[in-house]
Amino acid sequence: EYKLAPEFRDLNQMDIQEWFQKTAEQILKLYKLTIEEDPIYGEMGTTICAAVGVGNKVYIANIGDSRAYVLYNNKLTQITDDHTVANQLFKQGEISKKELLTSPYNSVLINVFGYKKNFTIDWFSTELFAGSKIILMSDGIYSELSNSEIVRIIANSSSVESAVIGICDAENMNGGRDNNTILIGEF
């Protein structure tokens, strides 16, 4: 769908949000066909973290607990907000930041993309500066590696490709208990 999309540079934030919503609906239609062939997939869901850059702005769609970060001047800043029970408890003041980091509810999602599931898309936008990187990653990465480890690997890598491989290798060496998906885009 992304490859079939209009030129994003000619779109504003509302246009991008509308395109993403229509794309999500199209994906769910295809998913429904898959479920009709094999009903076992009917209860499954996933997370989505997507970014579209237009000029020096990046627009981010988020469902679930995959995350978007910006890396600038060796500082990694989380842009998205996790859709987990633990994060909801933290926002309500029921657990501390320290408890949030180790909560057993970190992997319990309250918002997920899937057929027969209600989902909401959180939207974020941020400005990028020369030398910035936008980083999208699954919880398998950030739950195994600290921000400082991720920054160190990227800083010591000769290319974006080697940084991605280095981060995935480090996650696997730390246990690799979950999927590890990461995308890094340079600005």
Image (cartoon, rainbow, N blue to C red):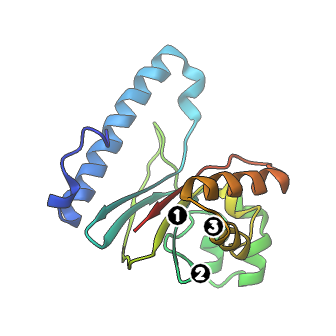
Front residue of this view, candidates 101 and 87: 101
Does residue 99 show up? yes
The numbered disc on residue 135 is 1
- Crowdedness of circle 3 by 10 Å Cα count: few (<14), some, many (20+)? many
Which residue is pictured at 80% across the width and 49% down the height? 177
Quarter of the figure with the C terminus: bottom left
Residue where numbered disc 2 is placed: 74
Quarter of the figure with the N terminus: top left
Disc 2/disc 1 C-alpha distance (Å): 13 Å
Which residue is pictured at 61% across the width and 49% down the height? 181
**Tag 1: amino acid:** Ile
**Tag 3: amino acid:** Ile
Disc 3/disc 1 C-alpha distance (Å): 11 Å
Residue where numbered disc 3 is placed: 154
Left or right? Give the position of 61 relative to 85: left
Q: Is residue 162 above or below residue 72?
A: above
- Crowdedness of circle 1 by 10 Å Cα count: few (<14), some, many (20+)? many
Which residue is pictured at 39% across the width and 77% down the height? 130
Snapshot quadrant of residue 167: bottom right
